[in-house]
Amino acid sequence: MKTKRYAYFVMAAAILAAMTGCSETENVLGSQPDPLAVKTSPESVAFDWQEVYQNKLEQFKVSADLTDTSMFDLCDITGDGVPELIISPSDDASASCDVYSLIGTDIAKIASCGSFGQFSFVPSLLVIGYEYEGEEFTIGEYQKYNEGFYDIDFSYYNNMNSASSGAVIRYELNGDNVSLAEYEEKVNGYKQEDSFTVGRKYSFGDEAMDYAIHCGESWKEVLTDAQKKKYKEKLDEVLKNASSADSAFELADLDGNELPEIVVSSGSLDEMPVNVYYLDNDGIKEIEASGAENGCLRFDIKANVFYSTDQSGKFICNTLSGESVSGFKPSESIMLCGRKYPLTSDNIKLVFD
């Protein structure tokens, strides 16, 4: 097992030199458990959905629907503890996601929703939706979960942005004209609930597909109770001191040693700071990194490098694996990480209890 001792920062060589001077700490008492040893390998954790979801991803990958910007996601949007497979064909404005769920031993399409290849999920209400804002109009839609499938609850339209051109302002629900008060009551009823964006997490590289299916949903079974306790205490501390209600987190194995790190996003805007917390023989250590789109880290699963780009397009790279990032170029296996769970007490308990 690799011991995490340092992070390589391309843009901060002086800090890197100081960090890489650490030496491996050995257990004083050989009888004590290794704090970095996990209960089991993530690949050994089996779920009923893995084979059928992998088959669906492989079918899509060789289909005519695959594009250079195709991605996918795994997220439980039905509230039964089993993730759905969400395939995003592209990031075009008109691109919606197809959502598949395990029903019995087979896979079924339960929803199609989104714009720019993603949609919002309101977990408290089991509602999904999207909004597209044009130059002079806004359109959107919300769908609600009912008896195994998502059905349209209502669609909406307004042309408030065309007021300056002298147009008659209209508000519509399901194609019918309504008052502004009726419109806001209906639309804001969902918009005011906590939500997060899903659909575009993993690229279709082989390593990304393998990680998503066989590792990404396994961490609760992999971590020991002691490791969960340390991570939970750290996240409780982060939550207490969080300056933004838009913070989020997730577990991700950033160095390929089967012991996941915690990635904490401070907000969903581009280039928001992201913190990585990892377990070391001496406790929990921290790295601050630059976020990419939507406040996430880009993680190259094949290279074990997480990165963003500066204003000139130059890569700002970090690694916990000890490998050189000189001349780094992203592979086809990319994961956006940091925003799987909104940072709340309930979600911290969900992941670590």
Image: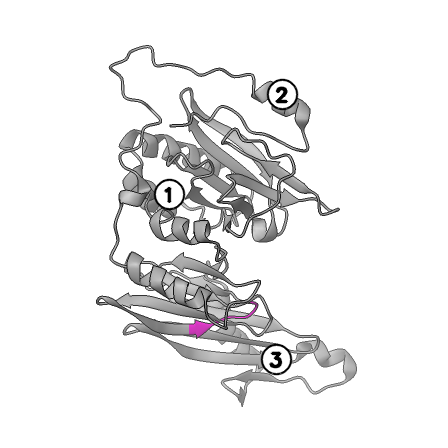
| 7 vs 343: above or below | above
The residue positioned farthest toward the front in the image shown:
62
- Residue 348 shows which numbered tag? 1
The residue positioned farthest toward the bottom in the image shown:
176
The residue positioned farthest toward the left in the image shown:
104
Residues at badges 3 and 1 in contact (C-beta under 8 Å)?
no
Q: Is 141 within the magenta?
A: no
Q: Give the percent coordinates (x, y) of residue 250.
A: 43, 45
Sequence-wise first label, 3 or 2: 2
User: What residue type is disc 2 on?
Assistant: Ala
Choose top left, top right, bottom left or bottom right for residue 348.
top left
Q: Give the percent coordinates (x, y) of residue 128.
A: 43, 68
Q: Give the percent coordinates (x, y) of residue 160.
A: 67, 77
| Residue name at image x 36 percent, y 53 percent | 213
Sequence-wise first label, 3 or 1: 3
Instruction: State the CA–CA distance, disc 2 to disc 1.
Output: 34 Å
User: What residue type is disc 3 on?
Assistant: Asn
Q: Which residues are magenta?
A: 112-116
Instruction: State the CA–CA distance, disc 3 to disc 2.
Output: 56 Å
Instruction: State the CA–CA distance, disc 3 to disc 1.
Output: 38 Å
The residue positioned farthest toward the top in the image shown:
28
Choose top left, top right, bottom left or bottom right for residue 30.
top left
Q: Which residue is mark 3?
A: 158
- Residue 17 shows which numbered tag? 2
Foreground label between 3 and 2: 2
Asked which secondary structure carries label 3, the reply is strand
Asked which secondary structure carries label 1, the reply is helix
